[in-house]
Amino acid sequence: MKTRTKADWGTRMAAACGFSLLMIVVFPQWAAGADPQWRETYDLVMRWVNFVILAGVLVYFGRRPVTHLLRSQAARHREQIQELEARKAQALAHLAAVRQTQAESEARFIDITQRIVALGETQRDAIIADAQRESEMLIAEARRRIAFAMRSAKDRLRAEMVDLAVDRALDRLPREISDADNQHRLGVFFRGLEKMS
């Protein structure tokens, strides 16, 4: 199969233009001297020839600009598509980064929450331990005070009992002890002194 080159195309266009020019110049004279029925056919053929010439001229001169226009449009659309795909890729990357940041934030929030709960539990345990120690100290102090109060009360009771016993003894002794008893006791006391010296 033979490929067409620009020279072949130009040669064919020159031949078509030459034939069209010949028909434009020669055929009107033939049509003028011919039969009147021939005129309708001539007009129809000339319209088609004019159309073919116009189409050929348009193809010959308009093919490059139209091809260039279509290629530039395609290139521009391709660039726009690539730009939109790049934006889409950026948006997807940004979305992935946001999701990763969100996941990290949630993990960090859970970690912080667990730390706060653990710290709160530690502080609660420390407060409870301090309260227990303080309550034990208060109970021990209360027991000491109670013991001291009991000793003080016992001492006061003893002192009162001794005072009461002395008072009773002082009341009863003069009635029950006679001078002879006093003399006997003095004798015992002096003898004890003599033995000691």
Image (cartoon, rainbow, N blue to C red):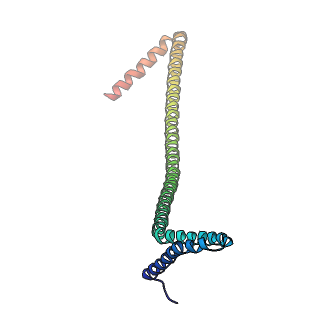
Horizontal and vertical percent for residue 157?
Answer: 53, 21
Horizontal and vertical percent for residue 21?
Answer: 49, 74
Residue 52 picture quarter: bottom right
- Kindly give the residue lying farthest to the bottom in the view shown: 1
| Towards the viewer: 193 or 66 | 66
Residue 51 picture quarter: bottom right
- Kindly give the residue lying farthest to the right in the view shown: 37
Q: Is residue 47 above or below residue 135?
A: below
Horizontal and vertical percent for residue 68?
Answer: 45, 67
Horizontal and vertical percent for residue 56?
Answer: 52, 72
| Towards the viewer: 105 or 157 | 105
Q: Is residue 45 left or right of residue 17?
A: right
| Towards the viewer: 57 or 79 | 57
- Kindly give the residue lying farthest to the front in the view shown: 33
- Kindly give the residue lying farthest to the left in the view shown: 197
Q: Is residue 60 above or below residue 152?
A: below
Q: Is residue 193 left or right of residue 2?
A: left
Which residue is at a point 53% across and 46% down the rendered structure image?
Answer: 117
